[in-house]
Amino acid sequence: MTGLETITAISSIVVIDIVLGGDNAILIALASKDLLPEQRRKAMFWGVVGAILIRTLFTAVALYLLKVPLLQFAGGVLLVWIALKLLVEEKKIECKTGNSLVEAIKIIIVADVVMGIDNVIAIAGAAHGSIAMVIAGLIISVPIIVWGSTIILKLIEKHPLIVYVGAAVLAWTAGQMMVSDTLIIKYAGSSIPYFSMLIPFLTIVAVLGIGYYKNSKKCT
């Protein structure tokens, strides 16, 4: 993999994690809001560390599973659904509040794992089999999510186009996952011109088109 491809992959991971991680940032804030300031900082720090470690482990498992024929294609299809959900779903966030440092850390880690399944699938697809890229992307994106969550959420509310950009990155990643599956390459890759570029492009068009249509129907 070239330097440009590595930078592109890590950038995709960061964008995906930031766009999909807004709920997790709110969750962290809610879980630690009743603690004293010093304890709140510790809860956020250790909760984030625990979440990164567990999410890296889960993503490593996902990277291994995606090597199984047709599972990578299935992961791409699932990622298309996640991209559509990002665009059209109205999110409701419920989270317990921790009354102690240990309880808050536990709530942050457990809830992040539960809410982070979509992130794991998306990041595994964008990482092209490299756990080093996964770790690099998470190290960059998670602190941004946690400490810049207020700014990120305000920007998304003010500029909905950001969500569409994130959905486009997810859709491109989904398309790449589908065309990179070993069985798909074997039976379709050589028979369709520009297959590896065409499918990701059409996936972006489909996701953004359906998302825009469904959102426009909400407003009428």
Image (spheres, helix red, strand yellow):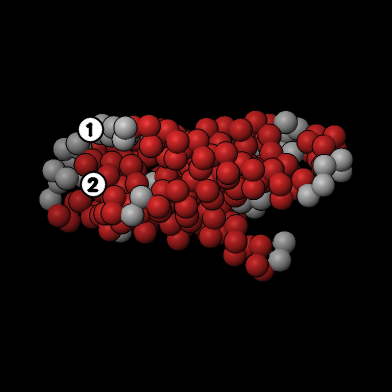
Q: Is residue 122 visible?
A: no
Label 2 secondary element: helix
Q: Is residue 94 visible?
A: yes
- The N terminus lies in quadrant: bottom right
Quadrant (top left, top right, bottom left, bottom right) of the C terminus? top left
Between 42 and 95, the one lying in front of the other is 95
Q: Residue at x 80, y 34 (%)?
A: 183
Query: Quadrant location of residue 141?
Result: bottom left
Which of the two residues, 172 or 100, is positioned nearer the viewer here?
A: 172
**Along the horizontal axis of the image, is 105 left or right of 198?**
left
Q: Amino acid at mark 2?
A: Ala
Identity of the residue drawn at 60% across and 61% down: 8
Q: Give the residue at mark 1.
A: 96
Classed neighbour count for the residue bearing mark 1: other residues with Cα under 10 Å, few (<14), some (14–19), many (≥20): some
> In this figure, which residue is indicated by the disc labeled 2?
29
Q: Earlier in the sequence, mark 1 or mark 2?
A: 2
> Which amino acid, mark 1?
Lys
How far across and how far down the image is residue 61, in percent? 60, 38
In percent of width and height, residue 39 lies at 19, 51
Are discs 1 and 2 less than 8 Å apart at CB? no
Q: Label 1, label 2: how many angstroms apart (C-alpha)?
A: 11 Å
